[in-house]
Amino acid sequence: MPVADAGLLPPAPVAERLAADAFAPAPSNPAGDVVRLTDIRRSFGATAALNGVSLSVRKGEILGIIGRSGAGKSTLIRCLNGLERPDSGQVLIEGRDTTRLSERELQPLRRRIGMIFQHFNLLSAKTVADNVALPLKIAGQSRRERLQRAAELLDLVGLAEKAGSYPSALSGGQKQRVGIARALAARPALLLSDEATSALDPETTRSILALLKDINRRLGLTIVLITHEMEVVRAIADRLVVIDAGRIVEEGPVWKVFAEPRSHITQSLLEASRPRLPPAIAGRLSDVPTGEAILRIDAAGEAAEAPFLAQLAAAVPGGFRLIHGGVDHIQDHPVASLFLGVAAAHASEAVAFLQARAVKVELIGHVQDDD
Amino acid sequence: MSKTMIDLFLRSLWETILMTGASGFISLVAGLPLGLALIATERGGIAENVWLNRLLAAIVNGFRSVPFIILLVALIPLTRLIVGTSIGTWAAIVPLSIAATPYYARIAEVSLREVDHGLIEAARAMGGNRWTIVREVLVPEALPGLVAGFTVTLVTLVGASAMAGAIGAGGLGDLAIRYGYQRFETAVMTWVVMVLIVLVCALQWLGDRLVARLDHRG
């Protein structure tokens, strides 16, 4: 899915100026991990929201955390800025353990962590510019400095002309842009995104994701986002963590997880965005090994770059028919997912041929010819 | 109406405005912090303290359940301590304020509780402390409701101040009872009621105008 949305983005010099003065790496962080969680546990009453989560977030990456509702992802992201305190485990932010800090000691640290929310959480009684400037007011900057910085950031998110408006006059997408500007105001080392696009329509979602990706790329800002939508992760994340029932069930580069989801939570989360066998054929599948065999093919990376279909057509007598599917590009890696039909007599031959070329094949059944 | 009657009328109007204004001001200054304390100390509040919350709630409920006319008499020793006398307009301001403060605290509490919890979370995520949350989030976001509630309190005080005639506080209500009701002077009664209607309408109109200007929730 394309995420280009250049029309809504500010001219490059603005972002570069911001990048030059604003987002210098934190001096106290030689290791390169912005966040490191070790065995985080958190329970609410008898239910364990987080059940031993360990993960690290590298400087400059976009980490997507995905899970169903109730999987513990909200609790997890709130542990990163201390809005939620784990019962046990260690939360290292730029090398400092935040679990030992008091609420008062956490406050300056939270200023290094921006956060955006599903429902934007803008203050209705303040103008757009005052909303963006609020983190700076909290940090004790003068009004002149605050408003100057707010103007820069509104420029960055493409809303310079809305500075004097109140949030109620903005659309959902504009509100989230203000939320992003506000989260960036105090020059954070880390941006947390809590279902930031879940309340937006698909088109606005794409433009907000494009903005986040752009900020990540141009300013080198580390982003952790939680979502229940695979499309969000696929559009902008570098790495993906799947959580279920308070545990990490799968982790890896986005394209790899998309190509080869191992846990069935991941598989079911991916279900909607992967090609599916057309119902007319799915309804006629049987185990009787005659007629036409239906193969499900998954290939990614190098395997998908090779001309395996052409080779298969040449190698199997009678060739095959392409039923459904295509090749997707995730993080610039080809990820192919196809359904093929071959004559049942040559099915095992075709499977062996493809497996020899590092292509994942599954014989999912047979379809008999209608008489 | 005679010259003496007009003077009496104007003096009574001024006494009503003074009682309403002074006790209204005190109920705002004391009731808003009390309302903030009620929501801050409740379970899940920004300064959770369940025992303090129960104590404050008990005090508020206690004062609110005593009929005003009883409170007026019961507070005479306190009034004498503060004002030096238990009779007159200034003496009435003490029990009026003490009755209006918990009343406004409850009204303020309702408006403050309606502030979206997500906004408080956002302020915390920015590194704000409790004072930031009160000053930048709770009070500004609840302001339209706080102003509307204060208007209600003022109008209630206009009515309550009539009872303060019982301790010689004067005011329009007292004038209506003594001249209009007890002496059957219907003209005085009619005038008083008309002026009270105008006063209440004016207060409500001003309050509504202010709320409309402050409300940006769209």
Image (cartoon, rainbow, N blue to C red):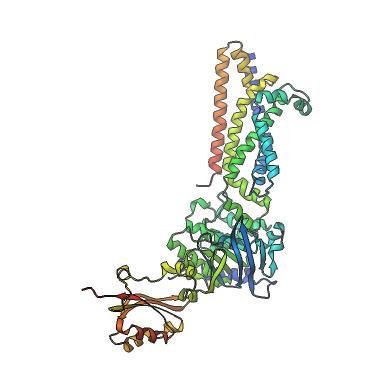
Residue A300 visible here: yes
Percent x, y of residue B195: 57, 23
> Where does the image place residue B91, in percent across and percent down from the top left?
72, 25
The part of the image, by quadrant, that contains residue B73 is top right
Q: Residue A194, relative to residue B171: is it above or below? A: below
The quarter of the picture where the N terminus of chain A appears is bottom left
State how many labels appear: 0
Above or below — where is A268 with respect to B82? below
- Image quadrant in which the C terminus of chain A is located: bottom left
Q: Residue furthest front?
A: A288
In the shown orientation, is residue A287 left or right of residue B108? left
- Measured from the top left, where is residue B110 in percent x and y? 59, 41
Residue placed furthest toward the left: A371
Please give the name of the residue rendered at 60% of the width and 37% of the height, measured from the top-left corner. B107
Q: Residue furthest bottom?
A: A315
Q: Residue at x 70, y 28 (%)?
A: B95
